[in-house]
Amino acid sequence: MGVEPDLIPGIYNYCDRWCERCTYTSRCLQFQVESEEIQSGDALRDFDALNVRFWQDMGEALIQAMRLIKEMAEQEGIDSEDLHKETVFSEPLKSIQLTAREHPCANAALVYSGMVNEWFAAVDEFSEAEESLLTNHPLFLDEHFQVIRHYQYFMYPKIVRAIEGRMSDPAAAKHEPQSDAHGTAKITLIAIDRSLAAWSVLYAEYPAHEDKTLSILIHLDRLRRSLEVVFPAARAFVRPGFDA
């Protein structure tokens, strides 16, 4: 299977581990190996085509999210310099692993995970529905909730891995755009982008919780900017299949 011409070598190395939403399952060896049932090539390609539209819609929502963050911050009186405040990379203190886990970006990812849980808890408490929002939400919002929940705990371990890579080989991480650290940082940035897009939709749908949602949007935006400072070449990393 590894020599089939349609397969993309290494495409699974820098993906978001969300096969159900991938547009390249028909060309991924790992998906074909792990899939419980054998599907024809045509069926996989049809499946991929459906997901293309999903991510196009999320891309449009991301543009909306960026506009929303700026507009709402201005309304809330948040200074533009504070909005664009970036976390500065810190030098190793003890061990590589310990420092990576304590890095401001890693901590911010953990804080975000908690903010998500707090948001859902607050909405559930406010709602008169008997069932939790986790299992009982409007159907048209289902995809956005899926995005938020899929990436909620995805960011932290990826950030730790990226920072460990940078610390273990600073020269390579700085001068080699195709380093593993930059590749790992890129998929983390993509996860943040998609989460921002999903939250921007929920902002409009849950007006009673605008403040909490805006806090999440601003927190994620700061984390995104911070990662781009720590890994300035991450966006330029070329992932097999996805970017080339």
Image (cartoon, grey):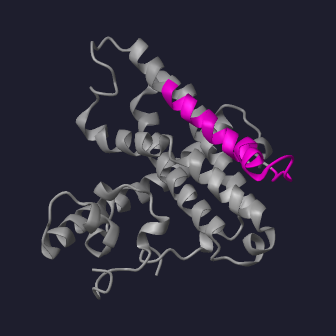
Q: Nearer the viewer, residue 76 or 136?
A: 136
Tell me if I can see residue 135 in this picture: yes
The residue positioned 29% from the left and 39% from the top of the image is 142
Majority secondary structure of the magenta segment? Answer: helix
Residue 150 screen position, x and y as percent: 41, 44
Q: Nearer the viewer, residue 24 or 131?
A: 24
Segment tinted magenta in the rendering: 88-117
Position of 199 with respect to 135 (left or right) is right
The residue positioned 77% from the left and 46% from the top of the image is 99
Position of 185 with respect to 170 (left or right) is left
The residue positioned 46% from the left and 35% from the top of the image is 203
Within the image, what quadrant is residue 134 found in? top left
Within the image, what quadrant is residue 12 found in? bottom left
The residue positioned 36% from the left and 60% from the top of the image is 55
Q: Is residue 2 magenta?
A: no
Residue 242 screen position, x and y as percent: 43, 73
Q: Is residue 110 above or below residue 85?
A: above
Residue 227 screen position, x and y as percent: 68, 55
Tell me if I can see residue 85 in this picture: no
Which quadrant of the rendered structure holds the N terminus? Answer: bottom left
Q: Is residue 168 above or below residue 73?
A: below
Residue 149 screen position, x and y as percent: 42, 39
Q: Is residue 156 above or below residue 75?
A: below
